[in-house]
Amino acid sequence: MADKQLNKEINKYIKEVKSFLICDLKTQKKFINDLKNRIYEHIDSGDINNAEDIYNQIGEPRKIVQGFFDYTDTRKIKRRMTLVKFIIIAVLIALLIWGIGVSAVVIDEVYHPGYFVEESYEIDSSGNEIVADR
């Protein structure tokens, strides 16, 4: 099997592993990089030559991920995921508030172009103007 075909099979295998891997991006990248290194070590030693060898030497993607979660502190992963969700929600809320503010300014400019100052005058008994409100 050509190296190009083997790389295609490795990418397919990695994609399948990722489909079972539910965790934060940092942990996922580290796990995938470690898995790729392990696969390439097997290729260098001659243990992997095709897609079937990947499954035989490394294991089924579901079992690989299951083993990862068995030996990983899932509380740490959960905290990271919660923090990421919080940051995303905060950014979305900030964007929503900003969008509402911009919309209000635009709508105000469209329906109330310019401004005016209203002043009330009173005239006293001698005929002089007295400014009542400013």
Image: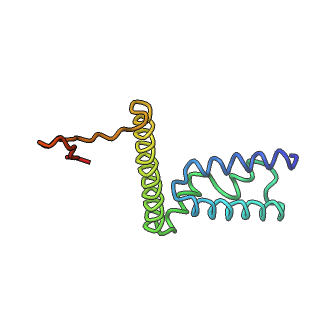
| Image location (x, y in percent) of residue 86 | 42, 58
Which residue occupies 74% across, 50% down?
10
Which residue occupies 45% across, 42% down?
102
Residue 102 placement, left or right of 36: left
| Image location (x, y in percent) of residue 49 | 82, 53
Which residue occupies 48% across, 59% down?
84
Tell me, what colour scheme is on the image?
rainbow
| Image location (x, y in percent) of residue 72 | 51, 68
**Extreme residue toward the left, this view:** 125
Among the 4 quarters of the image, the one containing residue 112: top left
| Image location (x, y in percent) of residue 53 | 75, 52
The residue nearer to you, when weighing 58 against 122, is 122
Residue 106 placement, left or right of 59: left
**Extreme residue toward the top, this view:** 111
- For the image shown, how many numbered marks are present on the structure? 0
**Extreme residue toward the right, this view:** 2
The residue nearer to you, when weighing 118 against 25, is 118
The residue nearer to you, when weighing 104 against 18, is 104
The residue nearer to you, when weighing 5 against 29, is 29
Residue 94 placement, left or right of 35: left
Which residue occupies 79% across, 56% down?
48
